[in-house]
Image (cartoon, rainbow, N blue to C red):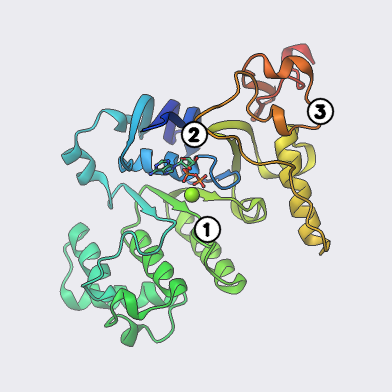
Amino acid sequence: MEQNILEIRHLCTSLFTEKGELKAVNDVSLSVAAGKIVGIVGESGCGKSMLARTVMGLIPSPGKLVSGEILLAGRDLARLSRREYCAIRGKELSMIFQDPMTGLNPVMTVGKQVKEAIRQHSAVSTAEAERRTIKIFESVGIPDPEKRLRDYPHQLSGGLRQRVLIAMAMVCQPRLLIADEPTTALDVTVAAQILRLMRELCEKGTSILLISHNLGVIAQICDDVYVMYAGSIVEHADPITLFENGLHPYTRGLLNAVAALHRNDEVLETIQGVVPNLLHLPAGCSFSMRCAQCRPDCADHFPEMRRVAPGHEVRCHLVSGEEEA
Ligand SMILES: Nc1ncnc2c1ncn2[C@@H]1O[C@H](COP(=O)(O)OP(=O)(O)O)[C@@H](O)[C@H]1O
Ligand SMILES: [Mg+2]
């Protein structure tokens, strides 16, 4: 059997706010096979970053992991102590955060931060660490790397800071890299370069969980895609199946938006309405109030994830499973 580097089972993370429990991650199950790039796509506010932070053991307050398992090479991270978590972050598990200021120390030069990350995980001389830093800076497209490594984070543009973070996450060649919207702040050429780098890193043995609100980005490099909506996974398939035969009305909406972008439509086709407030989720399908195909019973109970073909699963009352097909 193919080994999964990451296997998440029935994960629930909630934010216990003054207004009540906000289910940011609601019964999420997914897996990342060794040597693969797996994408998570969904609109802003659907819980992608909260899911990533839960895997990293860095849930912001007032959030808490409520239930579920996070198996990294078979070991359940949900049970780790803070100290055990620190020992695996960096070497085994690394994350590129959505906000490029998170994760950089404002009072240390970026070169020193990357060198320290290298030296923390491998016994190399300062000179060798510097050489590697310059090399990784070059490969993430930081111009003039010898000069840049003497800069402090505030002296760099947002795009350059993002590239430093990517370099730092990549330099230790972790087993699993979680990249949360890594290219959103970058222009298209640099973004394409970063995606190529991720593919290379993956070929060297790092599995990647790539998070984006942009289905176009996800489809470009992922082997497998999970569509997330209002804290839950609503569809799972490889990108070709998703494009050719995406079945969930929400997935179809995302696909239409990508197609409209390619046609350069003046009026961008979007999905009607907004992501529901996760504090007050409806009892039934969380997409029901935005769904053009919604039937009266859709709002009654939460749909199960059904397998429609090997490797293709959908959470929609309108889609029947394999055995019924
Ligand atoms: N610190 C916080 N306090 C309260 N609610 C939060 C906090 N951070 C995120 N949320 C809420 O959690 C939900 C998921 O957020 P997030 O994981 O950042 O979404 P995404 O990354 O998909 O845009 C959203 O409804 C957001 O409003
Ligand atoms: Mg996010």
Q: Residue at x 31, y 47 (%)?
A: 92
Q: Which element is circle 2 on? A: strand
- Label placed on residue 315: none
Disc 3 and disc 1: Cα gap in Å? 38 Å
Q: Is residue 165 above or below residue 37?
A: below
Disc 3 residue type (three-letter)? Gln
Q: Residue furthest front?
A: 19
Mark 1: give few (<14), some (14-19) or many (20+) Cα within 10 Å.
Answer: some
- Label placed on residue 199: 1
Disc 1 and disc 2: Cα gap in Å? 18 Å
Q: Residue at x 34, y 59 (%)?
A: 102
Q: Residue at x 65, y 23 (%)?
A: 285
Residue 321 visible to the viewer: no
Q: Nearer the viewer, residue 285 or 2?
A: 285
Q: Which residue is mark 3?
A: 293
Q: Is residue 322 above or below residue 127?
A: above
Disc 1 residue type (three-letter)? Arg
Examine the image and state in which quarter residue 9 appears. Answer: top left
Q: Which residue is mark 2?
A: 31
